[in-house]
Amino acid sequence: MIEDCDSAVVIWMNNSSVIANDLEILKRLGKPTFLYECSSQTDKVRAGELDPKRTYDPYYMKRH
């Protein structure tokens, strides 16, 4: 589904590794992505465009 989309809106809760992997794919494909990132442990919320310089899944390159 990621390959077929033109853009994405992603809600990332508690740094889920499955979503982190998807974020890396979206980033590498250059898909415009709006990320809503939240943590139930710290009650922090961030929202904005996907940062092309940020590593969302540190293990992504080892798996691909």
Image: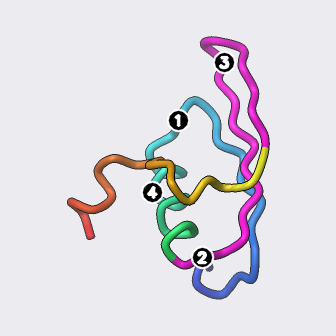
Type of amino acid under label 3 = Ser
Numbered mark located on residue 40 in the image = 3
Numbered mark located on residue 30 in the image = 2
Residue numbers of the magenta segment: 29-47
The residue at the point 78 percent across, 40 percent down is 47
Pick whichever of labels 2 and 3 is earlier in the sequence.
2
CA distance for labels 4 and 2: 14 Å
What quarter of the picture does the C terminus occupy? bottom left
Q: Is residue 18 left or right of residue 40?
A: left
Q: Is residue 16 left or right of residue 61?
A: right
- In the displayed image of the protein, which residue is found farthest to the top? 42
Where is mark 1, residue-wise? 15
Where is mark 4, residue-wise? 21
- In the displayed image of the protein, which residue is found farthest to the bottom? 4
Which x, y percent locates residue 4? 65, 87
Q: Alpha-carbon neighbours of circle 1 within 10 Å: few (<14), some, or many (≥20)?
A: few
CA distance for labels 1 and 3: 10 Å
